Amino acid sequence: MQGGCERTRVRSSKPAVILVGHGSKAKNFDGAMKSVAHALRKGPYSSVRRAYLEITTPSIPEAIGRAVREGAKEVRVFPYFVLSGRHIREDIPQIVAEERARWKEKAKIVLCSYLGYDERIVAVVKDRLRG
């Protein structure tokens, strides 16, 4: 409580977005993901946050919890991963299932498909190969 008044939050009908990266000890490792998050903030979302599976904060549960406490009725979790390994098949789905159960009375938690393959990515790779 600040100044004797409690801040109330208006529940948003727009979904919140959590971009999930792996996490790293390396400095500035997530520059590309920060740029994507910044660009998405211009879209139809109540908020766009980054979260990390390990090493770096905030964790996925922390980011989801913050979005829900700030009034999001729906939180879309987007794994910003290109490859489908254990993290995509097991770890992230398990975390999202736990958060879905935790917040079921307050918000819908949706696990989106990971970045993976898309023909548009091929175009970027071709462009970069040209130098």
Image (cartoon, grey):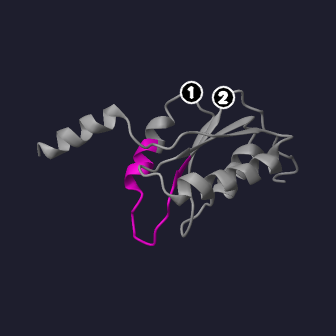
Distance Cα–Cα, label 2 vs label 1: 7 Å
The 10 Å Cα crowd at callout 2, few under 14, some 14 to 19, many 20 or more, is: some
- Horizontal and vertical percent position of residue 11: 77, 33
Kindly indicate the quadrant of the structure image that contains residue 122. top left
- Horizontal and vertical percent position of residue 123: 25, 34
User: Which residue lies under the disc numbered 2?
Assistant: 14
Give SS at disc 2.
loop
Type of the residue with mark 1: Pro
Q: Foreground residue, 111 or 73?
A: 111
Asked if marks 2 and 1 touch (Cβ < 8 Å), the reply is yes
Q: Is residue 3 above or below residue 39?
A: below
Q: Residue at x 54, y 66 (%)?
A: 56
Kindly indicate the quadrant of the structure image that contains residue 104. top right
Mark seen at residue 79? none
User: Which residue lies under the disc numbered 1?
Assistant: 44
Q: Residue furthest bottom?
A: 25
Q: Residue at x 40, y 69 (%)?
A: 27
Magenta span has 17? Answer: no
Q: Magenta segment, which residues?
A: 19-36
Q: Foreground residue, 38 or 22?
A: 22
